[in-house]
Amino acid sequence: MKAKISACILATLILVGLSACGEPPQVIQGTVVSFSADTKTLVVKDELPPNAEVSFSLEKADIGYAPEVGNKVRLSYRAEGETMMAVRVMDLSHGAEGGAKGH
């Protein structure tokens, strides 16, 4: 009986933990149009049509190399209201992990 209760409690905790994760981040890849360290914003021109320029907040982002205008980057992000919050910024011009050139 105690084993069944423990199993039910464990299953409930797992489900609660999984539901707390929320939606996975979205991904965009493109060219850096502008970057401001002061305002912690990054504008990227999406490589996919219609090649929109999208602005991201870097307030909570994990960043390898500091983005430079013209570099190719890949970002994972989440929409928080009207703001696109970058989760991770990978500068593909320097290697995906910020320094890991090559293989």
Image (cartoon, helix red, strand yellow):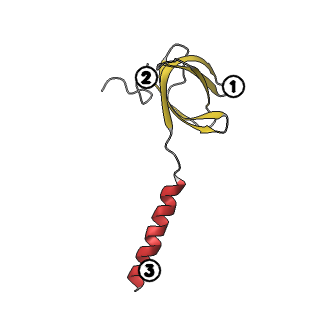
Classify the position of the C terminus by image quarter.
Answer: top left
View extreme (bottom): residue:
1
Q: Residue at x 38, y 81 (%)?
A: 3
Is residue 48 depicted above or below 15 in this figure? above
Instruction: Indicate which disc residue 92 carries.
Output: 2
Per the image, the residue denoted by label 3 is 5
Relative to 56, residue 23 above or below: below
Which residue reaches farthest front? Answer: 50
Q: Can residue 74 be seen by looking at this rendering?
A: no
Mark found first going from the N terminus, 3 or 2: 3
Q: Residues within 10 Å of mark 2 (few under 14, many from 20)?
A: many
Q: Which residue is mark 1?
A: 38
Going by the picture, which residue comes out furthest to the top?
70
Identify which amino acid the numbered label 1 is placed on: Asp
Is 8 left, or right, of 61 in this rendering?
Answer: left
User: Is disc 1 in contact with disc 3, using a CB cutoff of under 8 Å?
Assistant: no
